């Protein structure tokens, strides 16, 4: 689905704004993310690191988990903002795919430039989906 430019820009702006709240004292690589859900609501998230390094979480997963825990289920779009337009990690791709394989993805830098525009399925071709689980459908 293609978003209105205004909606897309608002999502990117949200991801850019919240990046200041990232907790990234170890990597010093703050990330901001924002998701647009089918209700029309947007949820933001940042990466949250931990002294026990593997226990940190990425910005994209913080944002989608916030949305899901508020009762949302369908992802329409996601924006990610980093200093250099870094790409979502494999774990985030898999988590996002559960809620919207066709969702638009805007990968941006802090200048607000869209470095890459794609979809969740574009980021994760051949995703493992709920349909692969026998007996559930
Ligand atoms: N990180 C994200 O939050 N999202 C991404 O798309 C890639 C990586 C975080 C994880 C860690 O806190 C820091 O960036 C460096 O890997």
Image (cartoon, grey):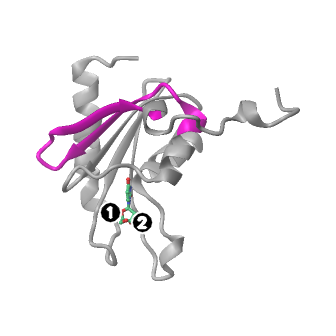
Q: On screen, 105 above or below 92? A: above
**Residue positioned 31% across, 77% down in the render:** 25
In x, y percent, where is residue 83? 19, 56
Q: Counting other residues with Cα less than 10 Å from the Cα at mark 2, is it few (<14), some (14-19), or many (20 or more)?
A: some
Which secondary structure, mark 2?
loop
The quadrant of the image that shows the C terminus is top right
In x, y percent, where is residue 11? 29, 34
Using the numbered discs, state the Cα–Cα distance from disc 1 to disc 2 in whole angstroms. 6 Å
Instruction: Give the side of residue 50 with respect to residue 72, left or right.
Output: left
In x, y percent, where is residue 73? 59, 32
Q: Is the CB atom of the residue marked by disc 2 within 8 angstroms of ligand 1's nearest atom? A: yes
Instruction: Give the side of residue 99 with respect to residue 131, left or right.
Output: left
Q: Counting other residues with Cα less than 10 Å from the Cα at mark 1, is it few (<14), some (14-19), or many (20 or more)?
A: many
**Residue positioned 29% across, 45% down in the render:** 15
Residue 120 visible in rendering: yes
Q: On screen, 130 above or below 88? A: above
Of the image marks 1 and 2, the number of the one nearer the N terminus: 1
Q: Residue furthest bottom?
A: 51
Q: On screen, 63 above or below 30? A: above
Instruction: Give the side of residue 112 with respect to residue 24, left or right.
Output: left
Contact, mark 1 vs mark 2 (Cβ under 8 Å): yes
Instruction: Give the side of residue 30 with respect to residue 65, left or right.
Output: left
The numbered dot on residue 98 is none
Give the extent of the magenta segment.
Answer: 97-120
In x, y percent, where is residue 39? 49, 24
Reading the image, the residue beneath label 1 is 22
Q: Residue furthest front?
A: 126
Q: Is the CB atom of the residue marked by disc 1 within 8 angstroms of ligand 1's nearest atom? A: yes
The numbered dot on residue 48 is 2
Q: Residue furthest left?
A: 111
Residue 59 highlighted magenta (yes or no): no
């Amino acid at each position: 689905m293609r978003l209105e430019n205004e909606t897309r820009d608002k999502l990117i702006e949200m991801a850019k704004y919240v990046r200041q709240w990232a907790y990234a004292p170890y990597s010093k690589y703050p990330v901001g993310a924002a998701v647009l859900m089918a209700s029309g609501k947007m949820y933001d998230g940042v990466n949250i690191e931990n002294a026990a390094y593997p226990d940190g979480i990425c910005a994209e997963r913080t944002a989608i988990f916030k949305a899901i825990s508020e009762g949302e289920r369908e992802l329409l779009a996601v924006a990610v903002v980093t200093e250099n337009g870094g790409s979502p990690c494999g774990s985030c791709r898999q988590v996002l795919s559960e809620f919207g394989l066709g969702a638009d993805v805007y990968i941006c830098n802090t200048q607000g430039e869209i470095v890459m525009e794609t979809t969740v399925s574009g980021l994760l071709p051949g995703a493992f989906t709920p349909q692969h689980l026998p007996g559930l459908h």
